[in-house]
Amino acid sequence: MTQRYPLTEPYAHGMLDVGDGQLVYWETCGNPDGKPAVVLHGGPGSGCGPSWRTLFDPARYQVTLFDQRGCGRSLPHAGDPTVDLSTNTTDHLVADAERLREHLGVDRWLVVGASWGSCLALAYAQRHPERVSELVLFSITAGTRREIEWITRDMGRVFPAEWARFRDGVPPADRDGDLADAYARLLADPDPAVRDRAARDWCAWEDTHVATVPGHQPDPRYADPVFRMVFARLVTHYWRNACFLPDDEVLRGVGRLAGIPGVLLHGTLDVSSPPDIPWLLAQSWPDARLELLERAGHGSGHGMAERVVAALDGFAERR
């Protein structure tokens, strides 16, 4: 992620007990008297790395980052195949964000979300609109079954050889069914070699369908066996369950965002999350501004981070 502001260290951090035996890691950076903001990272399972801090002016923002259940520094870690994921759902994550807001004594905050985090941000804002001052979203998704089917199956038309390898990573009997579900079962296999191969195959496909812009480099995080296991386990858990959302809930609930200003940033080369999702959101959300970046794909490259910073700078003085 492109750095704009200096990388500052947290002035407060902790582990919040959110129930169900879950401890969520959080940290707050910037100006303690600044405009409150919170970051919802992608994945699910990516964790909230330090580069997120550089998107915010540390003199004007009080920004909170946290690792969603099961990933990053939160505990228990989903990389352990014995860790139960039944209490790791969208409802739980929305409740965790709200519990963290209350814990920190924040009345309202600006919400930033990317990829899966944009879907989570929309779900949170639709359920707690009175707690959201603005939304800045990029690489936008809505968690629909259509999107999951697009990534796991239909995109084989774009990357046929790579998708064939991805499909063939599951047993023949599962290749015409729900691939996220099939991979989730492999990631729970008692044989660690089977689990590791499934995580590698899943992350290789993830790295393929974001590779639509010149100069794309493989994500170095996937070289870490711990990260790729957490990531693959959580993504497949959410996708096999349709993100734990009634289909089209996020798109149908846009009316609840009335009065909340938003900036929607999306790359025209993003085939992981086609631009029709942010376009549909913008049609029903008059307080949102949609910006399509012609050279950008899925993620923060090719000018995306700079546009995120510009959006945050534009909201910094708004109370």
Image: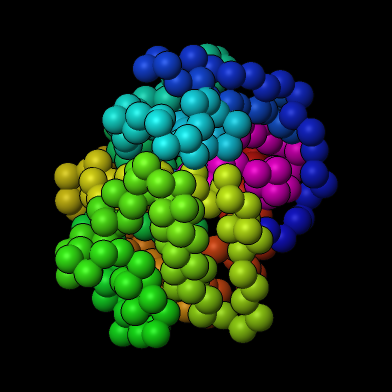
Name which quarter of the figure residue 295 lies in.
bottom right
The question of residue 57 being in magenta is answered with: yes
Quadrant occupied by the N terminus: bottom right
Asked if 88 appears above or below 104 in the picture, the reply is: below
Residue in the picture at 42% in, 79% down:
162
Q: Is residue 28 visible?
A: yes
Residue 13 x/y as whole percent: 67, 22
Residue in the picture at 19% in, 53% down:
248
Residue 260 x/y as whole percent: 40, 42
- Chain part drawn in magenta: 45-65
Residue 6 x/y as whole percent: 82, 46
Residue in the picture at 61% in, 63% down:
219
Name which quarter of the figure residue 259 lies in.
top left
Asked if 236 appears above or below 278 in the picture, the reply is: above
Residue in the picture at 25% in, 53% down:
181
The question of residue 287 being in magenta is answered with: no
Q: Nearer the viewer, residue 139 or 169?
A: 169
